[in-house]
Amino acid sequence: DTAVSQTPKYLVTQMGNDKSIKCEQNLGHDTMYWYKQDSKKFLKIMFSYNNKELIINETVPNRFSPKSPDKAHLNLHINSLELGDSAVYFCASSRATGTVRSYGYTFGSGTRLTVV
Amino acid sequence: SQQGEEDPQALSIQEGENATMNCSYKTSINNLQWYRQNSGRGLVHLILIRSNEREKHSGRLRVTLDTSKKSSSLLITASRAADTASYFCATVQTGANNLFFGTGTRLTVIP
């Protein structure tokens, strides 16, 4: 069983469209994250949720809206897609907020978003 | 910026050789972690070293941490073609609860 699974793996869409990426973890972790990896491989945190509550919201355009229906799921909805949104988006989870001081994150395999 | 920087950006070695990657960071940290990313895949956690530790081993991996220089190194001994991947360091700042990643080193091990 995949520990952190993201769907879709690839997403090609036109500018202006709205799209969602889904993430699910079966590890029983309390905290989930969205990271964006740009073309230079730089990973930047976007959001973090702990047990369905938003705890980190980095400087991300309002067009990006995370939603966590329960602690095992964290979805990312993007409105009015722009060319600059093209990137690989990674979902990750950790046991709980604060446990990153003792344990690492578990990452999904990523969603490659291409906006044309 | 909280981002770490890694050196070199790319490294190419022959199978069986050792590979050393370095990471520098800017702030006081709680711990530093190393991750591996194979092409087209997510990141895999390799090892975590706390700020009060100087060296840690895991299999063929050896990590050192020098908090006075704000730097860490990852040594992979007896490299294999399967070690070909990008390697990232990530730091947890003191008092913070999330990871900030470095820029990564692309390692190629030639069979």
Image (tube, rainbow, N blue to C red):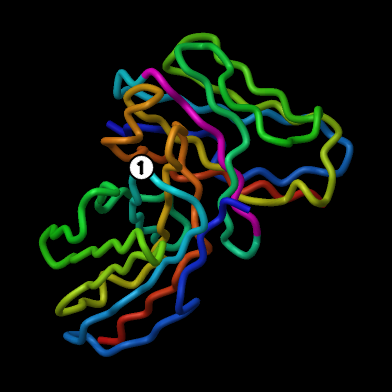
Residue appearing at x 44%, y 48% in the figure: B28
- Left or right relative to A26: residue A65: right
| Magenta span: chief secondary structure | strand
- Which residue corresponds to the image point at 57% horizontal and 51% vertical from the top-left? B2
Q: Front-most of B16 and B48?
A: B48
Q: Residue furthest front?
A: B68
Q: Residues within 10 Å of mark 1 (few under 14, many from 20)?
A: some
Residue B111 placement (x, y as % from top left): 25, 86
Which chain letter matches label 1? B
Q: Is residue B100 magenta?
A: no
- The quarter holding residue B3 reads bottom right
Name the residue: 18% across, 65% down: B61
**In the rendered image, which residue does mark 1 sit on?**
B30
Tell me which corner region of the image, top left, top right, bottom left or bottom right, holds residue A53: top right
Residue A32 colored in magenta in the image:
yes
**In the picture shown, does residue A67 fall above or below B92?**
above
Which residues lie in the magenta part? A30-38
Q: Up-down: is B59 above or below A58?
A: below
Measured as percent of width and height from the top left, residue A17 is found at 84, 34
Residue farthest to the right, as pictured? A16
Q: Position of residue B62 (x, y in %)?
A: 18, 66
Looking at the image, which residue is at 60% across and 30% down?
Answer: A47
